[in-house]
Amino acid sequence: MSGEFDIVLGIETSCDETAAAVLKGGRELLSNVIASQVDIHAEFGGVVPEIASRKHVETIDFVVKEALRQAGVSFDNVDGLAVTQGPGLVGSLVVGLSYAKACAIAASKPITGVNHVQAHLMASFLEPESSPGFPFVGLVVSGGHTSLYRVDDFFHVELLGATRDDAAGEAFDKVAKILGLPYPGGPVISRLAEAGRSDAFSFPRARLPETPLDFSFSGLKTAVLQTVQKIRRSRKKLIVEDICASFQEAVIDVLVTKTIEAAKRNDVRWVVAAGGVAANKRLRRRLAQECQRESLHFVVPSPVFCTDNAAMIAFTGYHQLKEGMVLRPEADVYSRIAT
Ligand code: KG4
Ligand code: ZN
């Protein structure tokens, strides 16, 4: 039992996953339901915001009820709600926020609004046996974000660096499109890369010496495009696996180097990776190796907690509710929120 907020219901609708989770006592995950729209968006080669919002409307009630059913609790048992308030697609966020506010207001239950990026960082606490210690440096790598943070506790999160153009996941998705591979690109590129040579092509790594903790992936994406076009024009055989492996290695080199640099500059002993791209096996292995070499502790959540989920929203929301951080009835959603 954990004070007034024993049972927290988390709701996430920031992009194309409708998700709900039930957390008990701030630690025990009773359910974690995720309805993905990926098959619907795949035919368009990316998320179509208007379709995403409509799908959330159709799905959200079922997903929440299923999360309560799997947790073995009724809505009456819920002590507080946590909902993603941003950043994300505004139309998608509005569905989750409106649904959660309606439930909370109708039943006079407290509700808190959660920053999606902050929640990705806190996903590292969902598996208590491998939780990080504070302070840590957190790398958030997803379809919409590539940023480094210094995290001192659940509420103090400082941005150290961010991408100037594409996010890492976006680069995976765009390179997949160039190669005629399906959306989302990350999982398929990482699978093909296993059979390719990572030194077959020397793609650029943007170091950005003036702001060394910032990222840039647009030059890399253009280099891949030009290489592929050149091979196609020459009618030589395009070894897709080699492109995938060389591209992936270039992304990972930059992510790993800058994350280690951030840990050193901030003199912290813990490193955390989060977000959809952190599901990438090679990135997980390289970060683990480099952290070990530098005597840093490394934590990365299981892949299901790297990609979008409501468990991370419930967990972050639980800590906010305990601090009395509740939403006002007129609360709105935000496509961008500074962390
Ligand atoms: O965190 P997430 O589920 O949603 C956002 O908040 O964006 O991340 C989705 C992104 C997509 O760009 C997808 O291609 C990428 O994560 N991704 C991966 C892998 N699995 C998902 N990228 C590289 N390797 C993977 N295994
Ligand atoms: Zn996300």
Image (tube, rainbow, N blue to C red):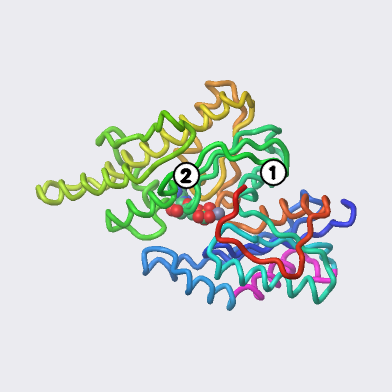
Relative image position of residue 127 (x, y in whole percent): 69, 44
Dot 2 beta carbon under 8 Å from ligand 1:
yes
Q: Disc 1 marks which amino acid?
A: Phe
Location of residue 301 (image quadrant): top right
Residue, far left: 234
Q: Residue 287 vs residue 231: left or right?
A: right
**Which tag, 1 or 2, sits closer to the chain's start?**
1
> Do we see residue 286 in this rendering?
no
The residue sitting at 52% across, 65% down in the picture is 16
Based on the picture, tell me whether residue 281 belongs to the magenta stretch. Answer: no
Left or right side of 195 for 187: right
Q: Amino acid at mark 2?
A: Asn
Q: Is mark 1 within 8 Å of ligand 2?
A: no
Tell me if residue 40 comes above or below residue 121 in the rendering.
below
Could you say whether the residue bearing mark 1 is in a helix, strand or loop? helix
What range is drawn magenta here?
Answer: 59-76
| Residue 300 in the image: above or below residue 144 | above
Q: Nearer the viewer, residue 267 or 160?
A: 160
Tally of marks: 2
Q: Residue at x 60, y 33 (%)?
A: 271
Residue 314 in the image: state x and y as whole percent. Answer: 72, 56
Q: Is residue 270 visible?
A: yes
Label pair 1/2, CB-CB below 8 angstroms? no
Q: Is residue 69 magenta?
A: yes
Question: In 3D space, how far apart are the residues under numbered discs 1 and 2 (Cα atoms)?
Answer: 19 Å
Disc 2 designates what residue?
A: 280
Prevailing secondary structure class for the magenta stretch in the rendered image: helix
For the point 74% across and 75% down, the residue is 102
Residue at disc 2, secondary structure: loop
Task: Please give the label number shown on residue 125.
Answer: 1
